Image (cartoon, rainbow, N blue to C red):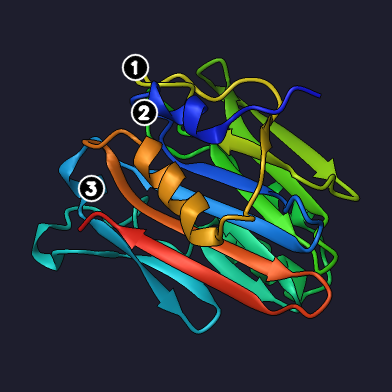
Amino acid sequence: MNKHSISALLKDNPYPGRGIIIGRSEDNTYAVLLYFIMGRSTNSRNRVFEKTADGIRTKAHDPARLTDPSLVIYNPVRHFNGQTIVTNGDQTDTILKHLQSGKSFQDALRTREYEPDAPSYTPRISGLVLPDGSYTLSILKSASGDPNCCIRNFFEYSPPIRGLGHFISTYQTDGDPLPSFEGEPIPIALDISGGLENLAESVWGALNEENKVSLYASKTEISTGNAKDIIINKN
């Protein structure tokens, strides 16, 4: 399997949008998760990540400059019963409610579709990490920009492979309209032997300086459930 360098994938891409990386550490000990957001508009760039009781949320850096909260203010990460949900929108809460009622990640996302932001119709990307480190990634997107059809893809990785992660983003790159991510999540080399901080900083440093907004990274020890996380905000 050809594992890519996540930093190399990101450094020459001005706008992948929002991205999720999930995988297993090289020593087979930790489930690793990263989520980043970028922005081209003032409204999108006016955000920070903030910890909550069960994960993180986005909030306006300057509330006076917030013009429309509908697609920019949400809970990207929430934890429930040893599971971690990560998404690029309010479908985080949809997934949580379904899990709480005994339904599945897939059940939840079958009730949702891409974002209503024509003409880009931004995909909804989501991930779920189970207590054993197995994970699922999903993307909900329009059919080549046709809003009459929503394509729902699910990718399950069980059991995870040591040293391997998968990356999915909302967009291929910059454009007008923005081109949706295509294909399967990209396999990447995942090594945190140098520390979670080093991995977070390498991904943050590879993101386009003008467009990057915030990044979240976490590692969870499979045997104990003990977790460590990091937030990096541009603002």
Relative to 127, 136 lies left or right: right
Q: Amino acid at mark 2?
A: Tyr
Pointer 2: what residue? 15
Give the quarter of the figure containing the C terminus: bottom left
Q: Circles 2 and 1: CB distance less than 8 Å?
A: yes
Q: Amino acid at mark 1?
A: Gly
Determine the CA span between mark 2 and mark 1: 9 Å
Q: Circles 2 and 3: CB distance less than 8 Å?
A: no
Image position, residue 166 (x, y; %): 68, 39
Q: Amino acid at mark 3?
A: Arg
Q: Earlier in the sequence, mark 2 or mark 1?
A: 2
Seen from the viewer's position, the closer of residues 141 and 157 is 157
Q: Residue furthest front?
A: 194
Label count reads 3
Image position, residue 51 (x, y; %): 42, 76
Residue at 76%, 48% in the rendered image:
136
Q: Earlier in the sequence, mark 1 or mark 3?
A: 3
Residue at 66%, 34% in the rendered image:
188
Seen from the viewer's position, the closer of residues 175 and 49 is 49
Which circle, 2 or 1, is nearer the viewer?
2
Seen from the viewer's position, the closer of residues 147 and 14 is 14
Circle number at residue 175? 1
Tell me the SS state at disc 1: loop
Q: Residue furthest right?
A: 159
Relative to 84, 209 lies left or right: left
Determine the CA span between mark 2 and mark 3: 13 Å
Q: Quadrant of residue 107?
A: bottom right
Tell me the SS state at disc 3: helix
Pointer 3: what residue? 45
| Circle 1 Cα neighbour tier, 10 Å, few/some/many (<14 / 14–19 / ≥20) | few
Depicted 114 relative to depicted 47: above or below = above
Q: Residue furthest left?
A: 64
